[in-house]
Amino acid sequence: MFGISNWLSSSSPDRQKKAGVVLISFFLSLILWGLVTLNQTYETRITLPIKVYDIPDTVKVTEPVTHQLSLDVKGTGIDLLGEFINFKPDTLRLPFDRQFFEYPSVPVEIYQQRIRDNLNSQIDILHTRPENIVLSYTPKVYKVVPIIFDTEITMNPAYQLSGPPEILEDSVTILGAREILDTIWEWHTERTPTELITRPQMISVPVVDTFKGIEVSPSSIDVFITPQKFTEKKLEIPIEILNIPEDKHVRLNHQTIRVTCLIPFDQYENLMERSDQFVAQLDFNGFDPLHPQVIPRLNLPNSIFVSSRRPLDVSFVIVNR
């Protein structure tokens, strides 16, 4: 370029005029060549993405929809060029209508007008692949299943629940594909710990809602919690044997059970006054000489929680009098 500029600047006016004519002629020829080329007819392939919308909540899509169409088209160069640089939506949007309700595989020809609306009107569609738009789905169904309380209740160390959590809603309703719901027999609350609870109160705990394709209602349940303050006590509980025949005598390797238990703080004095009534019982009728180990049954008030006991079982020997 610098050589041409220097040549033109050092040339005579006639030479500069001739050079200008040559350049103008070159650019005009280039433009004419482009116009002739763009007016010729060509065939090419266009990819048109597909999106199905308005899928109802009562339907679960089990396989991805046909995600795009491949169109073999014919048109002039200028029309095809315009198709690639135009500002029309480049996605074929199809509603989930009766066509998909009736057939999981819908012929593309049904949507020819929609396809054409996405293209330049001067472009001819020669062939469309695939020939069908596939959308596999299954109707969703409802199912009622019992709720299982798994939430961790946070309390001070001196507190225990005086009874199991009282769940006001004993079930939830789940919505999903039948083949999935047929494998589900129960639902659970979240394991997330609660806030610190020190008094009887109603709390709301969330239920699990992380299964893809399954909806659950309600999203939380109300639970009544009854924490109670307890104190620890170690007891030595005697073992008594019921229904011993008069001509039999039973010897045990242990005469008492050492129990560590939690006693409600507000009932401690009253229960301790009756502690001589606490017993561990065995029934002679359940003895099997071939298996001389038995587990004593602790006979304690329901408000007492046993945290440990030693020994767990005892050995016996039956002696004739």
Image (cartoon, grey):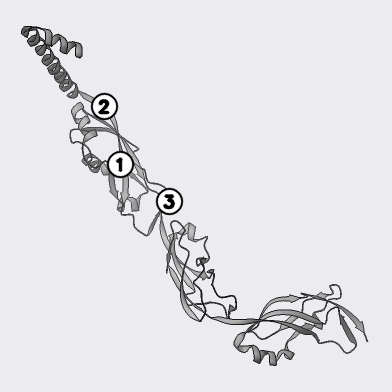
Residue 62's disc is 3
Label 1's element?
helix
Residue 43's disc is 2
The 10 Å Cα crowd at callout 3, few under 14, some 14 to 19, many 20 or more, is few
Closer to the chain start, of discs 2 and 1, is: 2
Question: Whole-percent x and y of residue 79?
Answer: 19, 30
Q: Are marks 1 and 3 in contact (CB under 8 Å)?
A: no
Q: What residue appears at the point 56 percent right and 75 percent down from the top-left corner?
A: 156
Viewer-proximal residue among 29 and 2: 2
Left or right placement of residue 111 versus residue 317 in this view: left
Q: Considering only vertical position in the picture, is 132 above or below 4?
A: below
Label 3's element?
loop
Viewer-proximal residue among 311 and 89: 311
Q: Are marks 3 and 2 in contact (CB under 8 Å)?
A: no
Q: Label 2 amino acid?
A: Glu
Left or right placement of residue 213 versus residue 56 in this view: right
